[in-house]
Amino acid sequence: MRMRYWLFKSEPHAYSFDQLRTDGTTPWTGVRNWQARSNMKAMEAGDLGFFYHSSIAQPCAVGVCRVVKTAYPDFTQFDPSSEYYDATSRPERPKWYMVDVEYVEPLSRPVTLAQMRSEPRLEGMVLLRRGRLSVQPVTEREWTIVRELAER
């Protein structure tokens, strides 16, 4: 099995990397984008991801998480009290999926979006082309480069 890499975006006021460290694991709920859903359905247990803080002054990758449970129906789609409720989704035919991720480690230092943008070797990275996608693939080469940037 080949290791695959991902990037998981979260607004720190909604769910932060520090909260993941406290919780240990969490379901990645509330994804309502078809491409992001497809990305989660492609994940395998053991895949690694960057935990990325978005919607802040300096968006940045702050840590590493690991997929520990592959895609299964996102329970929030069936809960009318949830902001992620989808009245068109049915338990027998769910539309939305989630994975569970666990805390692995913080990056040596955060890697900002600006730093990634200024790195020519990352010009094809999904984050830099389709920045709004909440769950996205990262190539092995991009993974290595971002880890190098964290060590500088």
Image: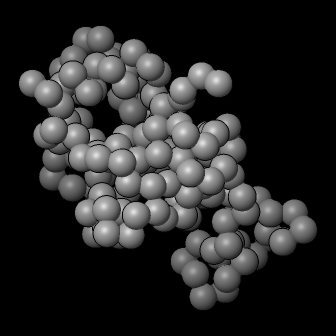
- Please, is residue 35 above or below residue 75 in the view? above
Farthest residue toward the bottom? 81
The answer to whether residue 35 of the structure is visible from this angle is no
- Direction from residue 61 to residue 104 in the image, left or right: right
- Please, is residue 35 above or below residue 150 in the view? below
* Colouring method of the image: one colour
Give the x, y percent position of residue 101.
Answer: 50, 54
Farthest residue toward the top? 121
Q: Residue at x 37, y 25 (%)?
A: 143
Give the x, y percent position of residue 59.
Answer: 23, 46
The answer to whether residue 120 of the structure is visible from this angle is yes
Q: Residue at x 29, y 11 (%)?
A: 121
Q: Nearer the viewer, residue 27 or 78?
A: 27
Q: Residue at x 38, y 69 (%)?
A: 23
How many badges with numbers are in the image?
0
Farthest residue toward the left? 152
Q: Nearer the viewer, residue 89 or 8?
A: 8
Dividing the picture into quarters, in which one does residue 64 lie?
Answer: top left
Quarter of the picture containing the C terminus is top left
Give the x, y percent position of residue 123.
Answer: 34, 16
Q: Residue at x 43, y 40 (%)?
A: 49
- Direction from residue 34 to residue 108 in the image, left or right: left
Q: Nearer the viewer, residue 149 or 131?
A: 149
Dividing the picture into quarters, in which one does residue 85 lie?
Answer: bottom right
- Please, is residue 62 above or below residue 82 in the view? above
